[in-house]
Image (cartoon, grey):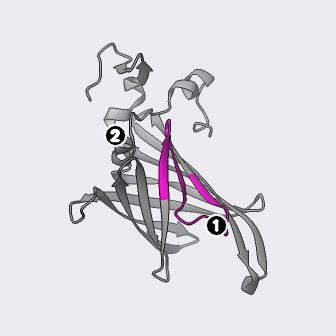
Amino acid sequence: MEAPSGNSAFTNAFSGVMFRNIEEAFNVYIGSWTGSQSVSINGEEIMAAAVEQRYIPTEASALPKLVGSGQILVQGQSIDTRCYMYLDGDKLVLDIHTLNDKITRYIGILDGNTVVWRPLYMFLAYDIQNDSFFRADKGIVMSSVGLRYIDAPARNFKGMVETKTILQKPDASYSKDKANIFQGGSIFNTKGGALGN
């Protein structure tokens, strides 16, 4: 996964947010994100949209939970989105509510600065998304790339659908001037002070 463009090679190499555990990755989703999304079919872009997404913590659950809501704005039309994210041991669980109110469940595992999402039941279709996190000038960027195989005979379609989403939220604790570097089991601030647990 590449860091957002416009950065030097050095910045790209050290701009990834490194999570020590899945709880840190869960917490980074909290807040309001804005950005853009493109959708491609078999390598050809068919749609570009503006995206707004919010994740709000709730205590109405036995497990730590985020309530997600948002909008995809494309050609003057608004599509509402809804999801719930849970922290469950060493993994994340994401329940996405579709437009016809069906629920698709995904499991997220941590890989450095990336959460890798796959369906809970992955036996008939290829469906994966990577959410990678990078520091920005005044906050944090989430770069998401999703790839899904769709076979829809009723619509006479079969092929790979790719989504690319870039979202940003203001968050001073992740700005570029507070770069985290993992050294010998501890996380240090580039300004010299050790960061807290």
Give above or below for 73 relative to 178. Answer: below
Question: Residue drawn 52% across and 25% down?
Answer: 14
Which element carries disc 1, helix, strand or loop? loop
Where the C terminus falls, by quadrant? top left
Q: Which residue is mark 2?
A: 171
- Residue at position x 36%, y 54% in the image: 88
In space, the residues marked 2 and 1 are separated at their CA atoms by: 38 Å
Helix, strand, or loop for circle 2?
A: loop
Place of residue 39 in the rendered image (x, y in percent of width and height, measured from the top left): 65, 62
Quadrant for residue 5, please give it: top right
Q: Is residue 166 above or below residue 78?
A: above
Q: Residues within 10 Å of mark 2 (few under 14, many from 20)?
A: some
Which residue was labeled with disc 1?
123
Residue bounds of the magenta highlight: 107-129
Measured from the top left, where is residue 72 in percent x and y? 50, 67
Residue at the left extreme?
A: 59
In the rendered image, residue 12, in percent from the top left (x then y), is placed at 57, 28
Residue, x 32% and y 59% (percent of image)? 66
Q: Amino acid at mark 1?
A: Phe
